[in-house]
Amino acid sequence: MALHISVISLVVPVKSLLCALVIFGISELFYLFTFVNDVDIEAEIRALQLDSAEENSGVGVVVPAGQNTDGVEILDNKVEEDIYPCFTDLKDEVRESTPIPDAQQASEDHEQKILHPVHNPAKAREKAAQGKAAKEEAEEVAEANKKRHLNVVFIGHVDAGKSTIGGQILFLSGQVDDRQIQKYEKEAKEKSRESWYMAYIMDTNEEERAKGKTVEVGRAHFETETTRFTILDAPGHKSYVPNMISGASQADIGVLVISARKGEFETGYERGGQTREHVQLAKTLGVSKLVVAVNKMDDPTVNWSKERYDEIEQNMVPFLKISGYNTKKDVIFLPISGLMGVNIDKNMDRDVCPWFSGPSFFEVLNAIEVPPRDPNGPFRMPIIDKFKDMGTVVMGKVESGSIREGDSLIVMPNKEHVKVVAIYCDEDKVKRAGQGENLRVRITGIEDEDILAVKPVPAVTEFVAQLQIIELPDNAIFTAGYKAILHIHAVVEECEIIELISQIDMKTRKPMKKKKIMYVKNNGAAVVCRIQVSNSICVEKFSDFLQLGRFTLRTEGKTIAVGKVTALSGASSSA
């Protein structure tokens, strides 16, 4: 090692002497001889280093950026040319004539490839495009393998236990921990409402907790092994039916909660009770599947009585049939206890309820099949709410088609062109979303030249509808000039009947071929009429788009009629 160091130390003095000799005009032959000696010394150094490398084979070496693989300091080329102008010329000539070992040549070739990469813009663009395509494909696969999503609305008479069941579901599915439950128990006890603590999970504002009544539609999420669910906890009090309509219009499945406690079922089922109205509204709003949860079966007045359960079922089945439900295919009855969590996430023990051997509530939800939507149809998302959050954010449920970040869309009926900036699903930011998802979408305005060709939803102030009278107010006559509140998807608007076109034969379900009718006063009658609203609203014909073509009419706090849009008058859909 000492010899190796001394040899290296000779390199610089020899180079200095060499340059001095050339400057003072010593013969060219002597200069060449000296330089060859210098080359011999360098070759000897390389040989020693190769021997050392063989002895330490297999040991990795990190080479600093300022050194070559021979361990000799690399001088800047420009500096070397300035100091030794003649030296560099001859050095190049000698190196051209001196054979280079194969190992060294391979190392230099590899180093040259690393230090001087060849940039090909076309290949770079192609690689970037392939990477983007692979990422999009991975997102598509992830979306395809995603659990299906269903919206479940809890409906029924006030105090039936809807919010309590919703809270129990969140607790059993792991969305709420024991510490939060203890907090709610303490809060409920302080208000002398010990049995309300589970409802506090869904009823989040002080007004709801103080009164024990749901006002706004509560919203929460939970998952089972096969499905993602959004819970929509609708208010049961008659004063908040418009809010219930808003929740039911977003639902795929309805859970009709009925209290089995003595006297409570009868109150909700009798005329004026919300059990009847909620069933009729749910069917009108497109809730095709219904789970009838007979709650409070553990109450001392019931004590899991089969006779009480059968009594409720026998009263409800005929009414459900009249409301349009197929009770054999679309309706299932379940006995449960929302407060105690019995028969919700797992089957009941026989010692609790020996006469029931059916599925649990979660098993029923997992097994329900809902009509498929069209993923390739035009994008439709009725806006149920909007607010400012780093831009404009709109909320709604996707009824048709799909949406991606960067999509250009049109907001109707004001024909505003917007661009999708961000999409949020169940509090998570996503790149795309399909039908059935409840979304928050951040949008921003875009230039006219960037607008994509889309098919906007029609905006009208007048339409023709087929209407069925449910219950008119006392001494009321349904005729031209009758005013009511129209509820259609997310729209609530005052409307007026401007013309009764014909009456419908209830047996054939077709218009009667008689002269134009002047009025209707019988509950249950059906008519074809023309309806007008003050402001433009977005609707579709029922035959084209079920979710945007059905509606209800309400007045004086009651639902008086349900109907479907059959024709559009003066529709405006161009941008």
Image (cartoon, rainbow, N blue to C red):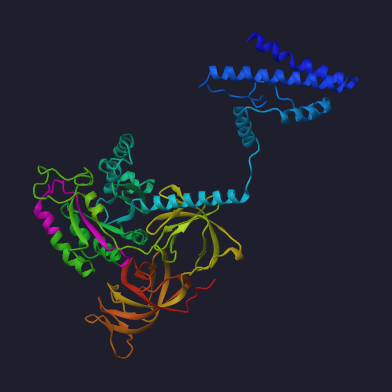
In this rendering, the answer to whether 428 lies above or below 554 is: above
Q: Position of residue 176 (x, y in %)?
A: 33, 40
Residue lying farthest right? 24
Q: Quadrant of the N terminus?
A: top right
The foreground one among 49 and 450 is: 49
What residue do we see at 13% from left, 55% from top? 309
What residue do we see at 42% from left, 53% from top? 140
Q: Is residue 306 magenta?
A: yes
In this rendering, the answer to whether 479 lies above or below 13 is: below
Residue lying farthest top? 2
Q: Is residue 234 magenta?
A: no
What residue do we see at 31% from left, 65% from top? 286
Read off the magenta span: 284-312
The foreground one among 329 and 135 is: 135
The foreground one among 167 and 519 is: 167
Q: Position of residue 497 (x, y in %)?
A: 39, 78
- In the rendered structure, the answer to whether residue 363 lies left or right of residue 356 reads right
Quadrant housing residue 271: bottom left
Instruction: Determine if residue 169 is in view.
Output: yes
Q: Position of residue 66 (x, y in %)?
A: 68, 25
Quadrant housing residue 554: bottom left
- In the rendered structure, the answer to whether residue 420 lies left or right of residue 559 reads right
